[in-house]
Amino acid sequence: MRKLPLLLFLLLLTGAWGVARAQSFDLTSGRVPMASLDGLWRFHTGDDPAWADPNFDDSKWPLLRSDESWSDQGYKDYGGMAWYRFQVIVPAGLDHVSLYFPYIETCYEVFADGKLIGTYGKMPPNRAPYTGGLRYAPYELPGSHAGEKVEIAVRVWHWPGWAMYVGGGPQFPGGLVGGTDPLKGRNKLEVASRFRSEGGDETLGFLQTLAGAGALALFLLRRKDREYLWFGLMMLFDAINYWVEVSHGFHIWNGNLHDFIVQMATAGAWLATIGFYRVLFGARRAWLFKMAVAAAILLVATACADVLLVQTIGEWFVALIIGVSDFVLNVWVVTVVFTGARRKSPDARLLLAPIVVSSSAAFASDAVQFAQRLGWQPRFGYVWFGDFVLTSRPFPIYAGHAVDALFLLAVFAILILRFTRTRGEEERFAAEVQAAQEVQQYLIPAQLPQTPGFRIESEYRPAREVGGDFFQVLPNAQDGSVLIVVGDVAGKGLHAGMLATLIVGATRTAASFTSDPEKILALLNERLQGRGLVTCLALRIERDGSGVLVNAGHLPPYLNGKEMAMEGALPLGVIPGANFSVLRFRLAEGDSLMLMSDGVAEAQDEKGHLFGFERVAELLSRRATATGLATAAQEFGQEDDITVLTVARLAAAA
């Protein structure tokens, strides 16, 4: 008796398993309500609103297949208005029905029992062609038509400019009619399929956008390296073309706008390409270069004319202009790269293979498109190098994608190598500048020597890492005199600093056997012939205050705040054997002499105002020190090296 409940439970469980069997799927009664629209449709050229009426008698209209264009069925090169008509029988119990139309050239309207249920593009009087979107478009029949017969009418307008090489009407089979929900699911699959088929364009567009943005960022950091600017623009313009084509695969575009953007982006990419190769390889402005620039400008003019004239200039003419321009531009690029490769340029050798392949593909593409515009499509077809599928996983990758990726990889490698070389050169230059600074600091003393009877103060503030101003204070312990040499090398930077260092060395050498300022400047003048121009002032002051001043184009000194009158003279290095102005004077006890370079008076603020000699005189009237005058000029806006040196004769007691 205790085992009876367990036995009953096992019997119930066994029965339940027997009842819960797998479902049987019956093909005769379990089908999804759907039927193909491929077949014969009534067709008539022209336009009449009455043809949308479900009661209109279309029995005399000819029958055309719905999976081929009308151009292939006796209406070759016809462009303009035309109508299709057919009937759909909706079974009982099916309340929501939709049509699933294949792509139809160029624009159309769909009517169900005389009611407009959908459009593609814009019909006349709008004269612009429309293109793009998914291969199939769903249109739901309004209301319930269960158990009824529905008259479908399709009003089509085919752009006459395309009729010569693209037939009007449906372009391929696959049209369907059926339940709305199953067709919505099918449409989602179509969207997913399109995303997959556009994977190559999406990937290249993303890579080119990323490369363009990165190159422009590098250009902002290194303004002198203009190859980054041109490469960035070239990549971004190419990316625009890819993104437009990706959008074209999902959305309906005005054909004029689409072609204008593509042609303008292509022209912009070509102009950037010309700038990139010219900077990269130093291409000369020869006749072929000028033709390439003219071809790129012609592409811009063609794009503008094509839109302004609403494509009335002829598709074959546009294709001819584009083909000729592409040919000239590709010939110039190939010539530049081959020339660079012959000169053993590593950059040119990296680009040689992708450039040859891409240029050959461009030649073939332009030839095929031009032939197609002339109506030679049966002979040449659509296929060209860029359409060859290399792999279908994870998405279709065409030969054109591979060429663009190879080119992008090659240029990326070139830019990395150039950046590495430039960085190495900058590091070597920085080391040279540092060495020059060390040499200059050694030759231009930071601390002045002892000068009994005189108080000498100096301020030296170079505008750059290495300055072109110089000064030397050389006291003579035997007679108590002091020799002072102050000068300014024409120019700035490392060259001026090295020349200043040379002059300092020559000055010390000359002072070892003469203390005559005139002889010292004469020796410096001979050493500087053909090396540069230098303004210089040499001053020798005896212990009793008597002095001689020799000037070679330098600013006259200020004695007790007033400028000393001196005749003008040529700078050093202009002509051999030049004569310099000489001034003899006496420095009394307590007198102060100030010498400076033109960097003080030529200091400039943000508005372009000069510091000027009036401010110098005003500061000196207030007994400004060398440090105070140099600081005032530097804070005003330093443009050149600043050197200020003061010499004051002390009283005998001091």
Image (spheres, rainbow, N blue to C red):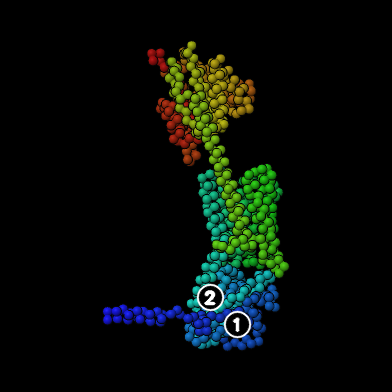
Establish if 355 lies above or below 114. Answer: above
Give the SS element for disc 1.
strand
Give the SS element for disc 2.
strand
Residue at horizontal 49%, vertical 80%?
25
Instruction: Point out residue 338 in the picture as x, y percentages from the top left corner.
Output: 68, 48
**Extreme residue toward the left, this view:** 2
Instruction: Point out residue 429 in the picture as x, y percentages from the top left corner.
Output: 54, 35
Q: Which of 480 and 404 is in front in this view?
A: 404
Establish if 118 lies above or below 455. Answer: below
Amino acid type at circle 2 is Pro
Instruction: Point out residue 364 in the picture as x, y percentages from the top left corner.
Output: 69, 60
**Extreme residue toward the top, this view:** 478
Residue at horizontal 49%, vertical 27%?
441
Q: In this view, does 383 lie to the left or right of 505?
A: right
Instruction: Point out residue 69 in the picture as x, y percentages from the top left corner.
Output: 65, 75
**Residue to which mark 1 is pinned:** 85
**Residue to which mark 2 is pinned:** 138
Q: Which of marks 2 and 1 is nearer the N terminus?
A: 1
Residue at horizontal 59%, vertical 49%?
411
Q: Distance between the residues labelled 2 and 1?
A: 17 Å
Q: Nearer the viewer, residue 245 or 643?
A: 245
